[in-house]
Image (cartoon, coloured by chain):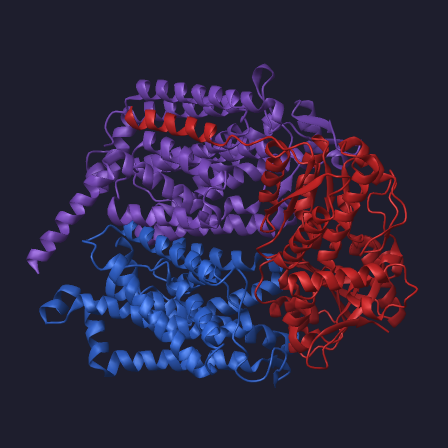
Chain colours: A blue, B purple, C red
Amino acid sequence: MSPEILLQFCVAGVTYGVVYGVVAIGFTIIYNTTGIINFAQGEFLMLGAMTAVSLHRHLPLPLAIAGAVAATMAVGALIEVLFIRWLHRPSVLRMIMITIGVSILVREAALHVWDEKSHALPHFTGDAVSALALGGAKISPQALWVVGVCGVMVLALSAFFRATRLGRQMRACALNRDAARLCGINARNMVTFSFVLSAGMGALAGCVVSPITYVQYDSGTGLAIKGFTAAILGGLGSTAGAAAGGLVLGLLESFSVWALPAAYKDAVAIAIMLGVLFVRPSGILGSAEAARLREH
Amino acid sequence: MAGRWRGAGFAAGLAAAVIAVQLAASAAHKVFYLTQLTMAAYSLLVVLGLALLMGFAGQASMGQAGFFAIGGYVAAFLTTHDLTPLRGRALPAALETLHLLQSRPDAYGGTLLHVDPRAALVAAVAAAALTAWLVAGPVFRLRGHYLAMATLGFGIIVHRIFLGSPHFGGADGISDVPALPLVGGFAVTGRAAARVANYYVAWGIVLATLWMLSNLIEARVGRALRAIHGSENAAAAVGVPIAAYKTRTFVLAAALAALGGVLLTHYNGGIGPSEASVMKSVRYVAIVAVGGMANLRGAVVMGTLLTFLSLRGYFGSLDDLVFGGILLAMMLFAPEGVVGVGVWRGVRRLLARRRDHGSAA
Amino acid sequence: MRTLSRMLVLAVCLVLAAAGAAAAADTIKVGAILAVTGPAAFLGAPEAKTLEMLAAETNAAGGIKGMKVELLIKDSGGDAEKALSLAKQLVEEEKVFAVLGPSTSGESMKIKQYLEDNATLLISCAAAEAITTPVLKWVFKTPQNDANAVRWIFADLKKKGLTKVGVLNSNTGFGKAGRGQLEKLAPEFGIEIVIAEEYDKAAVDLDDVVTKLKAKDVQAVVNWSIEPAQSKVPVSVRKLGWNVPVYQSHGFGNIKYAEACGVASNGVLFPAGRLLVADVLPDANPQKALLVKYKKDYEAFAKEAASTFGGHAYDAYTLLAKAIEVGGADKENARTALENLKGFIGTAGIFNFSPTDHNGLGMDAFEMLTVDANGKDCKFVLAK
């Protein structure tokens, strides 16, 4: 493989990797505050992008995206209030089924609100074929947008968790919910807020990536699986691990196309996930402590 | 509710219903309704296996459609792949001497040499059972989310492999699967002339499966499974070999799913990748949930009803929404199921619980 | 037992509820299985609109030999498994005279044996040569053969002196059949297929697989697909700064596919029927009058640009009408009439059927077209 081609595969891998990373972080935020794996995570990306496309017919692009992110956050809150909040110590199996049910509900609602066609926002700069040269490889300006926006989002999130009162409260809930409650933190609101936060992040990621991948009503499921794989690669529970897991997965997937028929690309990600689950459930990058959590 | 299965009464009632529906359909000159009822019967085999696994052993499987597809695809591949060019090679020759090959004329006047459908059936079910056995070891070391994700991931891999492999027909699947000859001149086939006979064959298989599973549940195995469902630690403490029971149940459920896949593939004359999709697996889970988890009767009733309505297209473009909505509603309001417990009791309990919270807060 | 008796009553009710009236003798039921929605909707939607338009026209004019046409369009969503169940419904429950469609090759391959077994005419709107080769008694098709499309492309490559090509195809019947023909005919034209890759019909991004092609230094890319994913190929090729010619199959013949590529569609080459360039044909062309009329009628009826796919449905419908006109309302006679039809002018070309040729079109049914996306809009033009 020439260095130019090698670099080209890296570009593709990183572009997708950061998106997987954002989905994985979305999983992590909710998992940390609730112990729930939210199977509807991918739907947030789809909803964000679809809403932005609709709003963009009437509003300029930045406003459309802001509106879509806000709307998706509202949906995130609604999901938590309607389907999660009032359940009393549900079993894990029940929670899995509920979030799967919610993801189907959102997806089918999107099918009827919009249609089954794929939609996309326009490229933020340039068009479908504009590309910048990067040491022999070509990189679309939109890919830079994706990497930039997702990167800033991850940094902002970690600052939020460290520097703000709300962020520290969420971390306290993640560490020990009962203790947090005793300290006067409203744990229930923290759960709602975790849904709002991960919905918003997902929606923004969906908007930036849509010019490259397009979105349609059923795009969420595939992204959720990839995001989950990234999350467990990074050791479920760690935000930094999730981001790194996303990048690793994106690169592995991209290079798998080189070695295998392209048709198996999606199977590769799942095989990696099963491999990690079977061999080292604490994740490649995670600590052994996370493995303890699988008893939950 | 997992108590004794009052088998004989239900089986007799079900048999009477099967006969009554056929007579009514024939009298009304609407025998074509039997087609979808036959298809529903075969999908019941997946549902029954899953009910045993989820309801009695308490193990979630989100990848059951994968086993159905392994059964269907292996049977379809073996009974359509022409071995004529390989004639004389070691394996086809060995199969030929064992009378496991069959030739049939194709549509264009040529002949097609392929594996006998009955041998293919055995191979297909064995392939699914073996896969289940291999997967069971690592899968059952996991719990909760990880277990669900692992089975889901298994289902997706199977789906992607069938979708991505040219041998399995890619997005279009395999067609021109021949009839599966059974004893006494019966054959599993979708031909209109054999519709009534096929309807009875399918429901006969369902009844036999019910009988087998109900015996299993009432025997020591059933008690062991219920113990595992109740508390694994307690079951282990009284000496139940948990891992072995879980694995056996998983393999049995997979074999049943594969059997359903093989039979439906012969009945439809083909199979496609959507049979292995995640949504299909979710549907099976939704049916088991609405049937009342540890309730084979509920699974039969709800499985037949929902599959029939779906296949007839009554749900229109809301098809997936219906199954997703059912799953969601069941898990929110009546996790033990409608037919088994009664949705009203579930709702009442829920209301009571909310009131408790209200007064506590 | 109570649930059981309820179930019994319900089941019997369901069966009895649907007592349909027998079709009146002066109507003729025509079934159509089309991908009106789903990934192949660019094919099925114009086909469905065309059929609706034609059936309304026929009935307004008093029907075929006095028989009104009752058109039953079923939406398969492009799913081959669903198509088979719909075919059974049309034949067994509706007792249709003939089935038009399906839109895609995979669906057509899946249901053709069933219609053959039930002695009902199938006039497919899908292109793969394998649908009518070898010939089945009851199965016909209207689009041009993929083998001929391949010959046009290879001839063009040879003219340009290019011999090393990379092939991409989608994993559906059309894509796979096309790849089969490409691999079969390549040696005849001295073309070497350096690499061939298959992608999912629902693929969202093909940058990586196109990169794989680029690494093999091929001189041209040939992409065989009929789903929207095909538009991703020219985009990826140009985005990677790669200037090789891109050939598409005749499955590219809807301007929406070109528009989906944006500026990347400029210069994409593909063989297609003359419908897309009807306006610039010389007046002497025997197809011109019909093409211009269909285009005008369709654009007035559907408020969108006509595509070759709608044209395939137009041909299927008009051929069936002709067969009924000649052979009458008897399935066997109509079939024989269709098989012996010669010199029938359609949108795809001039059909000459015979017992050994159920497609009836030759090499001359194609032109090599290209996309001109230099202006504000994309448009199809004749390639030089």
Residue toward you, B134 or A136: A136
- Viewer-side residue, C253 vs A260: C253
Count of picture labels: 0
* Residue A14 in sight here: no
Identify the residue at image location x=88%, y=71%: C161
Whether residue C240 sits left or right of residue C322 in the image: it is: left
Residue at point 38% right, 34% down?
B248
Q: What is the quadrant of the C terminus of chain A in the image?
A: bottom left
Q: Position of residue C14 (x, y in %)?
A: 44, 31
Which residue lies at the image location 23% right of the left edge and 32% below the top edge?
B1
Which of the two residues, A1 or B149, is positioned nearer the viewer here? B149
Please tell me in which quadrant of the rendered image residue B110 appears. Answer: top right
Q: Is residue B348 above or below residue C92?
A: below
Q: Give the side of residue C289 with respect to residue C125, left or right.
A: right
The residue lying furthest to the right in this view is: C284
Question: Farthest residue toward the top?
Answer: B184
Q: Position of residue A281 (x, y in %)?
A: 36, 57
Q: Is residue A115 above or below residue C130?
A: below
Residue C234 in the image, given as x and y percentages of width and height: 68, 71
Q: Viewed as shown, does residue C316 lie left or right of A47?
A: right
Left or right: residue B285 versus residue B6 is right
Image quarter hosting the N terminus of chain A: bottom right
Residue B307, image x, y percentages? 44, 37
Residue C175 visible in rendering: yes
In this view, the residue in front, C56 or C200, is C56
